[in-house]
Image (spheres, helix red, strand yellow):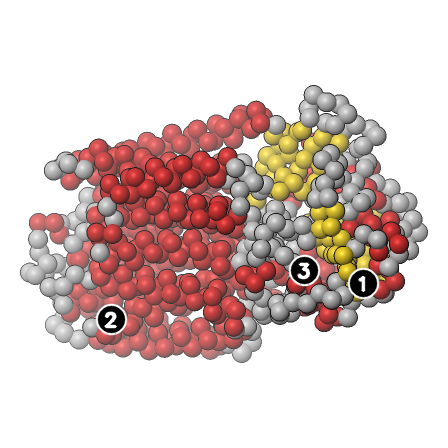
Amino acid sequence: MIYYILSIFLSAFLLFQVQPMIARYILPWFGGTPGVWSTVELFFQVFLTGGYTYAAWLVRRVPRKLQGRIHLALLVASLIAIALVGFSWPSPVMPDASWKPLNVDTPTFDIFKVLLAGVGIPYFLLSTNSPLVQAWFSRALPGRSPYWLYAFSNIGSLLGLLAYPFWVETTLTLKIQGWAWTGGYALFALLAGYGAIRSMRGAPGAHGAEQPNAAQATPTSIKPSRYLQTLWILLSAVASTIFLATTSQITQEVASIPFLWVLPLAIYLLSFVLIYADERWYNRRVFGVLLVVASVGFAWALADTSADFAQLVIVYCFLLFVCVMICNGETYRLRPEPARLTRFYLMTSIGGALGGVAVNLVAPFLFKGYWELPISFGLTWALMLAVLMTRNSANKALRVRFIFQVLVGATVLLVGAFSLYALVGGKTNGVAFEERNFYGVVRVKEANADDPVWRRYDMVSGIAVHGMQFTAPDKRREPTAYFARSSGIGLAMVNHPKYGHGMRVGVLGLGIGTLAAYAQPGDVYRMYEINPIMVDLAQGEGGYFSFLADTPAKVTNVLGDARISLERELVSSGSNQFDLLAMDAFGSDSVLVHLLTKEAFAIYLNHLAPDGILAVSVSNRRIDLRPVLWQAAKYYNLKMVFIPTESDGQMVFTSNWVLLARDPTLLEVPAIAQRVIPMTNYTSMVPLWTDDFSNLLQILR
């Protein structure tokens, strides 16, 4: 008995420990956007389905003794593969820098390729363990239900997830994390190999546990109907969709960090832990009432865009918990006899993978906004209503068919309604342009349409404005928003000794190109932007913005992650010798950690001229970046000042900028000195961030 518990627990722990670890490792390669985590989840859901498919095939179709031999051979092969790459990569599961993408055209494919190379084989074998061990348990102890082992599996998954942000990430470097995980996998391989050998013992039946024996043969052990199997898939798909949609909703407004990835996934797993440990945790009446409460909270969250982030996280997590408990609770109530458990797990894993496909591949094609969350929430309501309508029916087949038909019909109606809205509904709320890709949703909104003096266009991503431009000729070329002349970046621009004398400027985060409004004849501007939609809009698509078209400077737009582009430029052509390097690459209220590490600052300083200024936007409502910048300034012996600016209600937004320079006199000119908040006596216990170690939890406001 101990073997079954230990084997399932360890494999589940490793399965869900590797997800945030490898995502954290490759995050900088793909711009640090929330889409990376969703794509990583899709990969793991697909491979989980592959592992369950293999387990079902092995148990159902392969003779008993051959099952163990095949599985043992795969385990040995995986250890050999890990050993071959172990000393040429940072760790055996973390591909080296040669795997970084060369462009941003196919991020989903590139992420899949890197994950396949790094963790594909071990993850596949880990994912096979739970259904295999449960099937072998059912064979060895035919009178006992194996479903309780699934609760141990989910407890292991939950602990693996929670251990990462609260202990692993905060105490171990990424390299050590990779080696430690590899050691855990080697231990798992030994346990799984022992289990494979045990499975070959006993009476040699033709096939495995899927063949009902006398103890298992009951009227309900007949093959589940197609309607029932499809319903397993649909319910799991809805749960998966709402989990991924909630994750996107949270992470796109703060940061793509493991803690905010792990929280929704932990709630998702908790539902399995509770339901499979004791189905009494799921009571239809109670969760029907909780669904009404969640609906009120959801409506409030959508209506109040200025709500406190912590409150929003609580609302969304509560909504997620209620919905996945309903979906997974109803799925568990429709579970088959143990003789069919591998089929059951396979169908539910297919549903999970289809939910990932819906969020990552289908939704961006169908919708211009993030509509997955309201759609999946609507499907949960449809499920609950269908269940309540049929709860007293004695005919299980008719009940299953009715719930299936309700879910299919509700899916068609909801997807159709939101697709129609995406085509014709956006214009009614001032949206002149809306487009979605891997990097998020970008909108252009028209404001003050009836006032020719103050009419303007805003570029919006998430809930943050990335720039605005007025249409009136006397205001059209004026820098606005966070980049106004009174802002920290504005002061740094116009008071630099090279201003008006052939200034070289680098900008990390193009936005609408507002900083080009400062350019003078002879200036050279190099703009770095990862989102192709923003580049197209800044270059004049749709006629909304014209800062780049109007500037007298020579402007070059570099598409791709800013840090990777700067790294490659150092190697290929040397330093750009920027007189000013501005960093405003934080989408919405998110933070790209890889742009704030010691190694990133080394790249920036290599590209700065000796009298250059590094300007960093820290206008973040959720996170205080000053401790991180202070540590970097201290490490590289840089002068650092902080400049806050208040909104004027029209052309200037509230903004906070930090200016850093090797030469202190650059920041001591009167126009700057009278506006700064000195950092001379500032201190912080936040450690210096590196590519191997960072902790965003420490700087949450």
Relative to 429, residue 606 above or below: below
On the picture, is 329 further left or further right than 445? Answer: left
Relative to 250, residue 382 above or below: above
Image coords of residue 285 (percent x, y): 24, 41
Residue type (three-letter) at the residue carrying disc 1: Ala
On the picture, is 405 further left or further right than 254? Answer: left
Q: Earlier in the sequence, mark 1 or mark 3?
A: 3
In the picture, the quarter occupied by the N terminus is bottom left
* Secondary structure state at the residue bearing disc 1: strand
Q: Earlier in the sequence, mark 3 or mark 2?
A: 2
| Viewer-side residue, 547 vs 416 | 547
- Give me the C-alpha separation between circle 1 and circle 3: 15 Å
Residue type (three-letter) at the residue carrying disc 2: Tyr
**What residue is disc 2 on?**
4
Could you tell me if the residues under marks 1 and 3 are in contact, i.e. CB atoms within 8 Å? no
In the picture, the quarter occupied by the C terminus is bottom right
Answer yes or no: is residue 526 visible. no
Please tell me in which quadrant of the rendered image residue 15 appears.
bottom left
Q: Earlier in the sequence, mark 1 or mark 2?
A: 2
**What residue is disc 1 on?**
661
Q: Residue drawn at (33%, 40%), measured in percent from left and top?
A: 291
Relative to 634, residue 446 above or below: above
Q: Residue drawn at (51%, 68%), measured in percent from left and top?
A: 169
| Viewer-side residue, 283 vs 506 | 283
Query: Which numbered disc covers residue 626?
Result: 3
Residue type (three-letter) at the residue carrying disc 3: Arg
